[in-house]
Amino acid sequence: MKRYSPSDEVDFAIVGSGAAGGVMAHELARSGFSVVVLEQGPWLTEKDFSHDPLDPLYHPERSLSNELQMQTRRAKETDTAEKGHWIGVGRCVGGGTVHFTANYWRCPEIEFQQATRLGVPDGSSVADWPITYKDLEPYYTKVDWEIGVSGKAGYPFEPWRSKDYPVPPLPIKSEGVLCERGANKLGWHAWPAPLAIISRPYRGREACIACGPCGGFGCEVQAKSSTLVAMIPGAVATSRCEIRPDSYVRKIEMGKNGRVSGVTYFDKDKKEIYQRAKAVVLSANGVYTPTLLLLSATAAFPNGLANSSGQVGRNIMFDAGASAEALFEYDVNGWKGVDVSRVIWDFFEVPKGLGLYGGGGLDMRATHWSLAGGSTWPGEPTWGREWKKRSRDYFNRRVQANAHASALPVSTNRIDLDPTEKDPWGVAVPRLTFTAHPLDTKLSQFFTDRARELLQAAGAVKMSELKPATASTGGGAHLLGTCRMGNNRATSVTDSDHRAHDIPNLFIVDGSSLVTSTRGQPTMTIQALAFRAADRISHLAKSGSI
């Protein structure tokens, strides 16, 4: 791998190596630019991954959310924020793509023009995107073929596509059969799930072998199309890209000319290092990208970099999702293999006349929590003799119907810096202020009802409802909207090329760029935007416009 000195002025310093950062590294390096990728976590490989349910990636040194990433949270401005872990972050090379479920949904065309076509609900900050589905479709297709997505074209609820999937869908699982059974009874349409997990060998990677629990775990055979295996190797192979793990960026540095000059980060020994760069790409996710901008405030930008609009950190969106659980009278054994094999998109646009806004989809999957406490049932023993009698049933017969739905942006839902709490490096932690929009809670209830219907129609014998995810204080792994793109400098942070309105050589490419929440499955859209951004940024750089 190419090694750069911090004193070398590379063309691009990229902060983060996940869904967007890995794509940016791959594309910019392949376009001939020198690139340093700064990733706060370690560089793991297949030998580091385990499918032991008692030993997943939830360890401090391998880390999703842990003490290294404390946050605080409150419902409204007048509340005192409480410490906790309310976001899921992949702290390793490849980011959250290393352990994600790998649902890869395209947005429907209406997603990009909701304000115009559906209106702006009171109390929300819904806006049209500065681009359309037609602009992004070639890049959705590029995600399919460059990343490696399995699926089947022709679903009537999917937006139009210019090309089929590169590999067919993965085999249907038992809970997928149940999903089809329930959907057929209800007059809905179950379809093979599009997944960033390959069903056949593809570009030197092995196909899925259904080895065990998938979501939340790294893939030991490289079937999961993480940027760790699908993008990072190609970037490194150019001999123009250095991946620098264990590098925790704390500040974006500004030069005297109103342009960024590089980034300052802590290495694994907590030593501060300044990496020079001609341009900086922030791909640190929808929480830590705005946090970095706020941490990098200067006399010229007292409210944070790129924040003349006051929009940095605002409009944060999670999923307005919902779910229900059930026990079946026979073993389903859905814990083995990929999480999802069938999806239902009949409600990508919710029925009119119900006072709802947005839409979403459903799937069915097993709950593969560990036997040490997860394999139980509400109101029943969690340990001891009685628990042992039923634990096998709980683990093998339990199925969840999940809904993934849109959430409304609200300007008062935001990320800022906690005034008192610091992380282990002495850096202020992000503070979330969040209360779900009433229409999100209503949408969650609508999908909870649909989830229950689906399980009952599939033959469930015992039902348990879960509380809608966004009905209270928010949280999750999908961190969206905090540096939204737009044509109006007063209401957005970047333009449609992902360039910060205020700083010509600063780019923001991750979930924070999104204007709306993508029906609850944003990763494919984040990567399509990243491929498009790389094209646009390469053109700007080669034309001398950065």
Image (cartoon, helix red, strand yellow):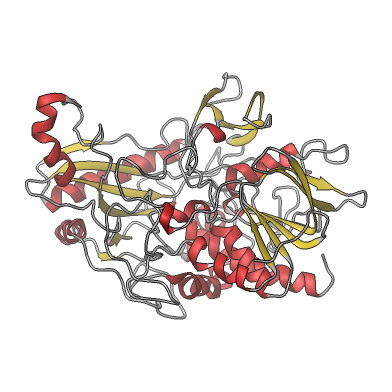
Residue at (41% x, 65% y) in the render: 222
Q: Is residue 43 above or below residue 145?
A: above
Above or below for 312 versus 260: above
Query: Which quarter of the picture shows residue 309?
Result: top right
Would you identify the image quadrant in which residue 538 lies?
bottom right
Q: Nearer the viewer, residue 275 or 342?
A: 275
Quarter of the picture containing the C terminus is bottom right
Question: Residue 526: horizontal and vertical position, in percent?
Answer: 54, 59
Of 528 and 447, the residue lying toward us: 528
Q: Position of residue 135 (x, y in %)?
A: 59, 71
Q: Is residue 104 visible?
A: yes
Q: Residue at x 60, y 50 (%)?
A: 512
Question: Would residue 326 appear left or right of 49 to someone viewing this image?
Answer: left
Residue under the point 68% across and 32% down = 427
Q: Is residue 404 left or right of residue 491?
A: left
- Where residue 266 sits: x, y (%)? 70, 41
Please give left or right for residue 269 compared with residue 453 in the image: right
